[in-house]
Amino acid sequence: MKTVFSPLHAGHSGQMELVAGEIVPGFEKPSRAEIIKARVETEKLGPILPPESHDVALAKRVHRADYIDFLPTVWERWEAAGKTGSAIPFTWPTRGLRGDVAPRTIEALLGFYSFDGGASFVKGTWDAIKSSHDVGLTAAHLVKAGERAAFALCRPPGHHAGAAFMGGYCFINNAAVAAQWFRDQGAARVTVLDVDYHHGNGTQEIFYDRADVQVINLHGDPMTEYPFFLGHADERGAGPGEGFNHNYPMPFGTAWDAWSASLDDACEKLAAYSPDVVVVSLGVDTFEKDPISHFKLKSADYPKIGRRIAKLNLPTLFVMEGGYAVDEIGVNAVGVLTGFEGR
Ligand code: 6XA
Ligand code: ZN
């Protein structure tokens, strides 16, 4: 399997995040991608290719244009306002406030275009976002060209990013952009299968009222787990999309037996939908030692995930999302891919 990777991810480094009352160094750090890349090499998964540049007009197929146009301007506006450190949002247009009027200052716009204080900017952030977008689309091209599967080693991740907001380390929703691109290239139906520990609220929002992209999420129950405000089992899609969104919220402590039962059920729904291509939002923060998550999967479980997905026998794009147990992130993420390849 070919991997697409860009060194430009590394400029998104040293950013702070707001989490549960504290401003802390981001768990989403460059070593994550570097360790996965090193494991791709030692496991001889296949060639590692640089991304080709793709127009962000493709991202605007699933994101609002004004949101995508805002992202490259953040850091220069932040510096022009005399600020340093990390650009972190702090005020959000929740219920009872105006979410329809874009304010003018950078500190206000950060809140306007986000849902939490978890996606923050430093100087190299936009270049990393753009490279991650390019990585996802370049890998999608490989699958379109006939590869059975490809691995988009995206960083930053994407699945929390909605049509017009960032959050949870995510800016552009790489998996959603790729799914839409496959549709635009002629795929009749596409499934996004999200196995990250956290609910992919952005992907769900983007495709919620559509029947042409099935979205399936396995994740920590939002009653107790981030992102808290989406991801319940009764969210099944709306209008023409009714019945094409499937959520599998699971409690803290969930281990392989229960998790894989959800995966089996999800794969049955996926197979019944009969998509032309599958986009896997591949997070490995389901791991028992993940520092911010509460499932109990073991390293030996990840190849089993890959084998189950391979049984679908469909063209498959793997898009990297979360995973913060850095020492094991390479073993676990690449374990899914080697499992997919039957080894
Ligand atoms: C709160 C936790 C963000 C989780 C990000 C993630 N700052 N999403 O891994 O999949
Ligand atoms: Zn996650």
Image (cartoon, rainbow, N blue to C red):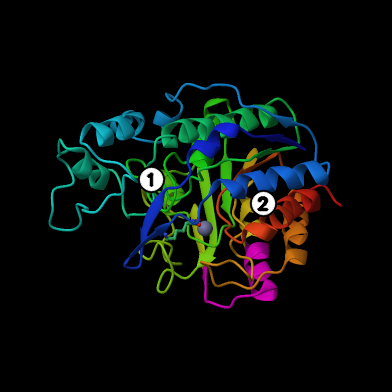
Q: SS at mark 1?
A: loop
Residue 284: horizontal and vertical position, in percent? 62, 58
Mark 1 residue crowding within 10 angstroms, few (<14) / some (14–19) / many (20+): many
Q: Residue at x 40, y 35 (%)?
A: 123
Residue 162 is tagged as 1
Residue 82 appears at what percent x and percent y? 22, 37
Name the spot of residue 89 as percent of width and height, x first: 27, 49
Give residue 191's quadrant in the image: top right
Disc 1 within 8 angstroms of ligand 1 (CB):
no
Task: Mark yes or no: residue 178 visible.
Answer: no
Q: Nearer the viewer, residue 255 or 238?
A: 255
Name the residue tied to disc 2.
Answer: 271
- Residue 6 percent across, percent down from the top left: 60, 32
Rendered residue at 64%/71% (across/down): 288
Q: Which amino acid does label 2 sit on?
A: Ala
Query: In the rendered structure, which amino acid carries the disc numbered 1?
Result: Gly
Residue 286 shown in magenta: no
Q: Give the range drawn in magenta.
A: 249-265
Residue sitting nearer the eye, 227 or 209: 227
Of the numbered discs 2 and 1, the one sitting upstream in the chain is: 1
Residue extending farthest right: 343
Identity of the residue drawn at 42% across and 68% down? 222
Circle 2: element type: helix
**259 in the magenta segment:** yes
Q: Do the residues labelled 2 and 1 touch (CB within 8 Å)?
A: no
**Mark 2 surroundings within 10 Å by alpha-carbon count, few (fewer than 14), some (14 through 19), many (20 or more):** some
Looking at the image, residue 271 sits to the left or right of residue 10; the answer is right
